[in-house]
Image (cartoon, rainbow, N blue to C red):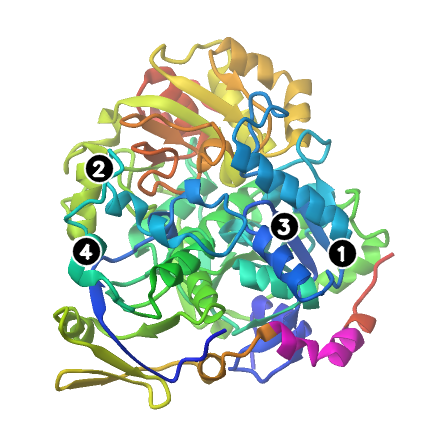
Amino acid sequence: MEPITVHTGKSVALMRNDVDTDQIIPKQFLKNILKTGFGIHLFYDWRYLKNGRPNPDFILNQPTSKGATILVTGNNFGCGSSREHAAWALKDWGFKVIIAGGYSDIFYMNCTKNGLLPIVLPQTARDILAKATPEETITIDLVHQRVKYANHEFTFEINPTWKDKFLKGTDDIDLTMTYEDQITAFEAKMPVFD
Amino acid sequence: MAQTMYDKIWNKHVISGKAGEPQLIYVDLHLVHEVTSPQAFEGLWENNRKVRRPDRTFATMDHNVPTEDIFNVKDVISRKQMDTLRKNCTDFGVRLAAIGEEQQVIIHAIGPQLGLTQPGEVIVCGDSHTSTHGAFGSIAFGIGTSEVEHVFATQTIWQAKPKTMGIHVHGDFQKGVYAKDLVMALIAQNGVDFGTGYAIEFYGNTIENMSMDERMTLCNMVIEGGAKSGIIRPDQTTFDYVTGREYAPKDMAAAKAYWQQFYTDDESAFDDRMDFDVSSLAPYVSWGTNPGMAVPIDQPFPEPKDINDQKAYDYEGLKPAQKPEEIDIGFVFIGSCTNGRLSDLKIAANILKGRHINPKITALVVPASRAIREEAERRGYDKIFKDAGCEWREPGCSACLGMNPDQVPAGVHCASTSNRNFVGRQGVGSMTHLASPAMVATAAIYGHFVDIRKQTVTA
């Protein structure tokens, strides 16, 4: 996993609440058995018209959104289905950071596994960030837990364990493998009812 | 200090880490299906890792399986996803209930059916409706594919313990009102994120009087309120359900003695509390595009309070102040991990017995498992459904999410016993209206929802 310490990038704002993972990546694209290739189907039903052409009104289809790496959005982002394909699709499109009012628990964990930094900021801060123009950038300083835009600066909370994972880009399984002795000892003490 | 049941089970599973921080916890049972597992198995291959405990892992095929002609998987990509699971299970020694086999089920039916789901366990699956298993007094939650790979390799998972919310449910349901209505009411009244960051424990006389099937329906849908898990204290109803199943403990007396330690000391242990009286609860019907957009059958749809509500009305072709009776139903789906169990089929069959569905309606009845299907056939429910004009199908997830050919056509309103009414969930342009099996079966007859409390024929 690629580490994140400080990230500066262009943003797009999609200020809707309760965006569910069925909308982020619809079911017909879950049959892929790889982790890549989901980006072109991101927000499929909003992004494409019935005839399959891109919907020119949707924010991601506007030429100014090209190259954006930060998604500013509403409350309860990523609710519903556990599909990690939603995180893969956002990552595959090019997003590295999401700034929302909150996340579903499973989606949040999926982000931590894929180097997609989920930041929580209140509505007032997000309303300001949503005004960023395509010429402007937002900077996320994970080390100091700050989001900077123009002359604004917001601090955010993040669990220290997940923060450390993002900073180092560690592989969880390698880390857990170092607990092998403790896992084996735990298994030896488990109750058996046979 | 007073502890919740969730705390007690959690603490028994901690391998490393301090309270208040993410902890490494042991997983007793890992359930696997074809959609969220291929990338996890691929990760094992790439890193030359094994499945640490194949004996604690169980897989089935459910999301993609056709329910009409089950061995004829026409969709090439669906077939590839199922073939991939079969190969992975063979290579890694994981038990698989494959398509058409005796034990093939929706993943959340397999654990309870085989006695794998037991009180006091930690159960995970790459599927958000894993919360279902909390009905047995276990900690059960959905995980992503990276976490599936982690559990394969280590039989553990890093998790921060959620806060706990105690919901005291009391009173007796009116005739025609069920656990499904209770959970839909909780979500409609408190919002689709009221449970985010929480595990919800349900308790009180209403819960004690519920069957295991009803408890599973309740815990299944807590995820639609944002909660990670639902949990219910194991009692005699739980023990009786588990007893005698294939993987149930052989020494039930010892198991029961162990399980009985899992209860919440007192209500002060919860981070939050709520109270719900079901005695005046009406059947619920969803009108919009998330499970919180729902009303009691006798109430009008609300004025839009935000852009999401307005978009939902536009999508559904409905207007504020209309009532659920006015939705023109063209499709009916009875099934899913929420309401595809034997008792659900029994309720629907009792309503449809000797009657016929409205001719404009296509109705699919899809049991959650092959065992449920066979038992329903022994009881003659299949004949009742077929005589009523319904299609009696093979088990699977089916039209709950339409990853298989069972999809609701665009522009058609579907009365559905499933759990999600998101835009396009049951098929592109489809419009889902969630309700209980009794409400859905009755809607199949009338072509629209009716208040089943006023019906003479009920389950």
In this rendering, position of residue B171 left or right of residue B258 = left
Q: Say the numbered circle drawn on residue A59.
A: 4
Q: Which residues are magenta?
A: A173-186
* Count of numbered circles on the image: 4
Specify the amino acid type for callout 1. Answer: Pro
Q: Are marks 4 and 1 on the same chain?
A: no
- Which of the two residues, B198 or A40, is positioned nearer the viewer here? A40
- Examine the rendered structure and indicate whether residue A28 appears above or below residue A57: above
- Which of the two residues, A140 or B136, is positioned nearer the viewer here? A140
Which residue position is annotated with label 1? B54
- Examine the rendered structure and indicate whether residue B413 appears above or below residue B196: above
Q: CA distance from mark 4 to mark 1?
A: 46 Å
Please give the chain letter of the residue carrying mark 1.
B
Which residue position is annotated with label 3? B32
Q: Are marks 3 and 1 in contact (CB under 8 Å)?
A: no
Element under disc 3: strand
Residue A108: give x, y in percent of width and height: 42, 66
Specify the amino acid type for callout 3. Answer: Val
In this rendering, position of residue B76 left or right of residue B153 = left
Element under disc 1: helix
Specify the amino acid type for callout 4. Answer: Ile
Residue B61: give x, y in percent of width and height: 62, 39
